[in-house]
Image (cartoon, rainbow, N blue to C red):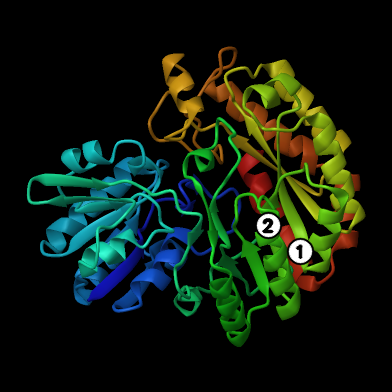
Amino acid sequence: MKILLLNPPAPVLVNREYYCSKTVKSTYLFSPIDLLLQSGILSENNEVVVLDAIALRWGLKKTLEFIKSLNPEVIFGLVSMVLLSWDLEFYQALRSLLPSGRIFLSGEPILEDPKGWLEKYPFIDGLVLRFASSGLRDYLEEKREPEALAVKENSKIKIFPPQNISEYSVGRSRQELFQYKSYFFSFARKRKFATMLTDFGCPHKCRFCVMASLGYRRRNLEEVEEELDFLKWLGIDELFLADQSFGSHQAHSQKVMELLARYGFSYTTFVRPDHPEQFWKELKDSGCHTVIMGVESANEEILTSYQKGYGLEEIKMGVRQAQEQGLRVVATVIIGLPEDTRESILKTMRFLRELEPDFVSYNLAVARNLTEFKAEAFRQGLVLSPEMDQAGNLSRIRTRALGSEELLKLKKRAIRDFYLRPGYIFKRLVEARSWFEVYALFREGIAVLLKNL
């Protein structure tokens, strides 16, 4: 069976992946993890073709012409909340072009009401509810009852809910099919890199985050080793480890770090700040050079309300201990939670300057499906549009005290406030370890500032 894994075109640069699509804040772009994991599962007994129209910068016409000439029997594609109308129009056009092809989608819009989605959009044949699941493959091969899948057969809709599974298996992801030259990662130490996943979802329960509702599954360690070995063969030794909270399962992460150290990989990953001091040393020793850490807010009440599980002191300690081990820290911050005021946002800006992480990623709050935050935001009338973008290039939410345009202005001010400091810029250049890092700093820095002046 010929199967196309598809990231459709878009009028703007957008990352559609892992139920958290967003417009690109600068110039970074990496392989969509939904497609990457399904490439391993579906290639076992099928011919798999990958088309990332975003990476190729293809428009609507060229993409549709290519797909028509390819004539796949199955399309597994991505859909996003950022460009929901655009994406739906694209798949409707694709259905007209390939009336006999079957279209299955993955993305945050489909998670909450898969039955309603399939009833509303007749040009969609099915929805993959967990991209780390083999449900689509099992359904296509009629092997057994699938899991985490919603399908439409004639006029009947069948829902196969996700199962409580502690370990998942995807085979070896077909990394060789995702070697697009336009993939670029801001925090990589080397130009050529790959994205990888060693677990799925998150065991923590932050109320604004969709990951808390996905369940938590760890990847089979033999598969992790097999993929690392293959990546080395491909000549790649720089990774973006996209686990949403690396280190959450201590025994599993320890074994992953041992493998990363053995193969000599350099990598970036997401972590929480509330790890013991020894963890930061083990991260560094295993090849990690950059950690992305959720700070979210300098308001202790907000951190408690949204069940972060740690407070400002733990954040300060985590950042300090990570940096003492030589790790760069990227602090992620959310602007626009219902409780936010102008004063609370300014307080967060001051806290970030005092905290002095190496980088800050400011995001607008997004009412994602399956989150408690979404229910509250809609109940309070704070969501202005179903199409939302956490990167903040499209403002679609307000707080009880601030309108959407004021939030966007504050977000831009926060970025300028942190990055346009002569001492900060000098420090970044002095600490760059290669000409590629200097190039990445200028490339990303200029792009970020142009969007936030």
Q: Is residue 361 left or right of residue 71?
A: right
Tell me the kind of residue under disc 1.
Cys
CA distance separating discs 1 and 2: 8 Å
Q: Name the residue rendered at 16%, 45% in the picture.
A: 157
Callout 2: 10 Å neighbours few (<14), some, many (20+)? many
Callout 1: 10 Å neighbours few (<14), some, many (20+)? many
Q: Residue 410 location, x and y as percent?
A: 66, 27
The residue closer to the viewer here, 172 or 221, is 221
Q: Taking 364 as reference, is 443 above or below it?
A: below
Tell me the kind of residue under disc 2.
Thr
Task: Give the mark nearest the N terminus, 1 or 2.
Answer: 2
Q: Name the residue rendered at 37%, 72% in the picture.
A: 50
Identify the residue under disc 1: 288
Q: Looking at the image, can residue 186 be seen?
A: no
Identify the residue under disc 2: 269
Q: Residue furthest bottom?
A: 233
Q: Tell me, for residue 275, which label it has, or none.
A: none
Q: Taking 185 as reference, is 348 above or below it?
A: above
Q: Name the residue rendered at 54%, 18% in the picture.
A: 403
Q: Is residue 250 left or right of residue 118?
A: right
Is the C-beta separation of discs 1 and 2 under 8 Å? Answer: yes
Q: Is mark 2 on a helix, strand or loop?
A: strand
Q: Name the residue rendered at 44%, 59% in the picture.
A: 132
